[in-house]
Structure formats: structure tokens, C-alpha cells
């Protein structure tokens, strides 16, 4: 009798041990919980020809920012699936391979086509979803809606209490404005599988979107101590706690959290998270009127250059340029902008002109040319989402515009933007700024 995974899909292995270890490894991978690698290697030891175990290990290497290892492992999966794989397995391996090799457009098309036939193949359905998924990094301005549409399209394929699907459906809804509905799903996902960093992380986002910063702090304080510091999302979830502290005006606590868990020397997270979390948190602390010790900027910039030596990723480059501006590296920023413009000319940067505009705005802001900063960002307000990431991560761009308008004396524009933000999301910080403008 064929062995099945927990979604009822056939596994091409005759080893019950391999199937069990694979299922456990995939659940840990989808939870971003330590131990996935060990389980997947145990599955491969039990059955060296188990293609999906090799593909899952390749995916985990990619998530862990180990590209050479990811390419080597997916090559093994491709060789095995070519000789004995099923149609689903060939499609599964192909989608992961395209993503690993940086062919994002083809990978997105392959993942969406695969999901049409096998929506319960969650390893593939997961590829387009989330803040760093293929949809978010597609260059689309409406990727939040696209993620909701994808989840709703396939919702009938999942049990209402499936912890994985609740996590991504709830997060997609919350990011797209249906905060209460999404938060309810995410709270249920946390109940169903507490050892799931993705659901706790997504719930923190939903609470941010709803202005429930006190609840976010309470969630993180009660949940994060049980998540190993080696967990990929440990530092980033701590970053959410620092954001909540800043909302209260408590920069001292925010910087203490940064020192303990977020800064490059303390975090075990993905480089993309470490760079973006460091840049955005330090920028917020400074822009909100608090002092940032100078060495923190330089340490973050040095780390960023070491892990992302070349331009070409809209979300990363946006944060790299903030670091370059903050550390006075105008020459480095100019080189990056020139490289980005070459990529745009060659249709190799889907997010387009918003990315170099962020760099110009960041340098103008650092040079206290606040009206110049605002002029760079105002025409592109509808395009901010094109760099990818989450609403909370991208808010730094709108914050830059807002603070520039306030400091540049454009109080009417700043007041209108604050009114829109407060209508969208309650924020003690925005309320303080609005009160200051009205005084």
C-alpha cells in the first residue's frame, strides 16, 4: 500500500521510517523550527532515493541562505526524479529548482500551475506566500491582494483547522486590510501548533496592523522564550517587540532588544532579515528623535556589505541604501543607484524606479534636505509595496516621507498623510505626531 503524507499525497518511498521522518521534517521546515535538517537527513538515510526528501532539504538550505548547498541538493533531487519520479514529483522539484536558481518569474508561474493541480502540496503552495515569497518579490504593487486571492482560491482543499493554511491565509488577510478576520485565524493557528514560528510571527504582524501593540508585546514576551535562539525567526520576532516599544516612545527598551537579539552579532536569522531589521530599526530610532550609538550603524553596514556584495534585490537594496546614507557612504550609494538603473533598463528589476528613488530620498534625508527627500518619494507612494516584504517592514519608507514633510515645514501634507494612516491603523506614535502638528 502506498505511503501518504498528512495531506493525502503519495510519497514515492517504501520506507515507513523515511516517510515519517520526511513528514516531521517538512512540518518543522514549515514552522521554521529547529530540527528540520536532522529529520530530513534521517529520511534520506532511510531511503537515499527518496526524491522529495532531497528537494525539501534543498529548500531548507535556500531558506537558511546556503545557496551552494541548495543548488547541490536540488541537483540530486532532479537526477532522481528524472529517472523514477511521478508527474507531481517532477513538477514539485522543478518549482523548487527554479526558485533556488533565482529564476523567480518562472518559479512563480510553475508554483501557481502546480497549485492548480495539487493545491495540498504545501511545500509548493508556500513558495508564493509570505513577506519574502515569490509574489511579494515579484515587483507587483498589489501582491497583498494576490496572496489573498491565491489562498481563497484553494481554501476548500484544506481542513478548517489546518495550522499551516490558517497561518498563511490569516496573514495574507491581515496584510490586505482584513485584520480582524486574519487575526482570528492566526490566533487559532497558534493554538493548534504553538511550536510554529511562522504563526507567532504572522500574529505579531496582524496585531501591528490592528494597532494592538500592547498585545503584540504580550504575545512575544510569552512566546519567544520557548523558541530557540538558533531559530531563523528569533531575531525578527524580537524586532517586532522593539517596534512595539518604539510605538510607546521607549527607545531605551527598543535598543536593548536590538542589542540582545536583532543586531548582526546577536541574530541567527536569515541575512535578509538581519540587514532589513537592523537598518529599519536604527533608522526609526533616529528619525523618531532618539540617539543611535554611531558604531551600530557602521556595524550593520559592514555586515550588510559582507552578505550582499552585489545589487539586484529590491528589498535588500532599499535597506542597503538606508545604511549607506546613514553612514555617509555617498559613493557607495551612487554606485548602487547606477547599478540599479542599469538593471531597470534591462528589465531585470521588477520593482522598478521606486528602488533608486528610495536611495536618493535616504541620502537627502541624511543630508537634512527634507523637501528633496519628500519630492523623491511623493510621486511613487502607490509603488512602495513593489519592493516586497511586509507592511510593517515597508512602513519605513512612508515614515521617511512623513518625517521629511514634518521637518521640511510641509505640515498640511504631513497632516493629510497622518490622517490617512490613523484611519488605517491606530498608532500612538502617529497620534502624538498629529497632535504636535495641530498645536
Image (tube, rainbow, N blue to C red):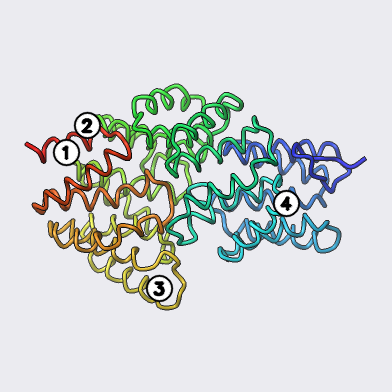
Q: In this orientation, which residue lies closer to the viewer: 342 or 170?
A: 170
What is the distance, in whole Å, between disc 4 and disc 3 at their CAs?
Answer: 35 Å
Q: In this rendering, is residue 311 above or below 46?
A: below
* Picture quadrant of residue 192: top right
- Mark 1 or mark 2, earlier in chain: 2
Give the numbered dot on residue 344: 3
Q: Which residue is drawn at 41% across and 61% down?
A: 314
Give the numbered dot on residue 54: 4
- Mark 1 or mark 3, earlier in chain: 3
Residue 336 pos. (x, y %): 33, 68
Question: Which residue matches tag 1?
Answer: 434
Q: Are marks 4 and 3 in contact (CB under 8 Å)?
A: no
What is the distance, in whole Å, between disc 1 and disc 4 at their CAs?
Answer: 54 Å
Nearer mark to the viewer, of 1 and 3? 1
Q: Which residue is drawn at 45% across and 62% down?
A: 139
Give the numbered dot on residue 249: 2
- Mark 3 or mark 2, earlier in chain: 2
Are there few (<14), some (14-19), or many (20+) residues within 10 Å of tag 4? many
Residue 374 pos. (x, y %): 19, 58
Amino acid at each position: 500500500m502506498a505511503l501518504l503524507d498528512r495531506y493525502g499525497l503519495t510519497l514515492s518511498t517504501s520506507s515507513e521510517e523515511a516517510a515519517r521522518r520526511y513528514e516531521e521534517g517538512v512540518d518543522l521546515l514549515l514552522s521554521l523550527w529547529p530540527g528540520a535538517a536532522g529529520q530530513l537527513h534521517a529520511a534520506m538515510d532511510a531511503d537515499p532515493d527518496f526524491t522529495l526528501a532531497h528537494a525539501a532539504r534543498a529548500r531548507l538550505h535556500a531558506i537558511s541562505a546556503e545557496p551552494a548547498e541548495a543548488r547541490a541538493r536540488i541537483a540530486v533531487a532532479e537526477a532522481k526524479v528524472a529517472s523514477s519520479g511521478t508527474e507531481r514529483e517532477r513538477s514539485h522539484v522543478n518549482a523548487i529548482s527554479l526558485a533556488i536558481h533565482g529564476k523567480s518569474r518562472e518559479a512563480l508561474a510553475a508554483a501557481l500551475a502546480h497549485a492548480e493541480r495539487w493545491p495540498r502540496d504545501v511545500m509548493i503552495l508556500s513558495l508564493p506566500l509570505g513577506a519574502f515569497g515569490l509574489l511579494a518579490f515579484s515587483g507587483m504593487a498589489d501582491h497583498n491582494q494576490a496572496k489573498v486571492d491565491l489562498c481563497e482560491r484553494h481554501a476548500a482543499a484544506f481542513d478548517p483547522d489546518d495550522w499551516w493554511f490558517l497561518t498563511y491565509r490569516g496573514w495574507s488577510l491581515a496584510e490586505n486590510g482584513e485584520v480582524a478576520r486574519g487575526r482570528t485565524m492566526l490566533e487559532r493557528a497558534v493554538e493548534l501548533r504553538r511550536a510554529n514560528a511562522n504563526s507567532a510571527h504572522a500574529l505579531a504582524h496582524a496585531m501591528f496592523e490592528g494597532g494592538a501593540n500592547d498585545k503584540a508585546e504580550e504575545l512575544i514576551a510569552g512566546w519567544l522564550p520557548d523558541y530557540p535562539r538558533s531559530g531563523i525567526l528569533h531575531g525578527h520576532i524580537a524586532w517586532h517587540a522593539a517596534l512595539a516599544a518604539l510605538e510607546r516612545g521607549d527607545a531605551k527598551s527598543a535598543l536593548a532588544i536590538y542589542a540582545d537579539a536583532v543586531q548582526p552579532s546577536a541574530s541567527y536569522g536569515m541575512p535578509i532579515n538581519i540587514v532589513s531589521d537592523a537598518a529599519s530599526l536604527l533608522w526609526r530610532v533616529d528619525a523618531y528623535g532618539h540617539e543611535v550609538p554611531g558604531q551600530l550603524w557602521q556595524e550593520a553596514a559592514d555586515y550588510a556589505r559582507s552578505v550582499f556584495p552585489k545589487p539586484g534585490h529590491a528589498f535588500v537594496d532599499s535597506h542597503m541604501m538606508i545604511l549607506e546614507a546613514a553612514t555617509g557612504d555617498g559613493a557607495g550609494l551612487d554606485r548602487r543607484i547606477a547599478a540599479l538603473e542599469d538593471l531597470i533598463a534591462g528589465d531585470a528589476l521588477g520593482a522598478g524606479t521606486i528602488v533608486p528613488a528610495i536611495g536618493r530620498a535616504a541620502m537627502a534625508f541624511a543630508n537634512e534636505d527634507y523637501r528633496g527627500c519628500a519630492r523623491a518619494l511623493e510621486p511613487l507612494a502607490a509603488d512602495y509595496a513593489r519592493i516586497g516584504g511586509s507592511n510593517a517592514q515597508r512602513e519605513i519608507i512612508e515614515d521617511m516621507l512623513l518625517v521629511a514633510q514634518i521637518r521640511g515645514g510641509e505640515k498640511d501634507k504631513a497632516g493629510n498623510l497622518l490622517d490617512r494612516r490613523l484611519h488605517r491603523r491606530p498608532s500612538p506614535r502617529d497620534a502624538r505626531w498629529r497632535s504636535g502638528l495641530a498645536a
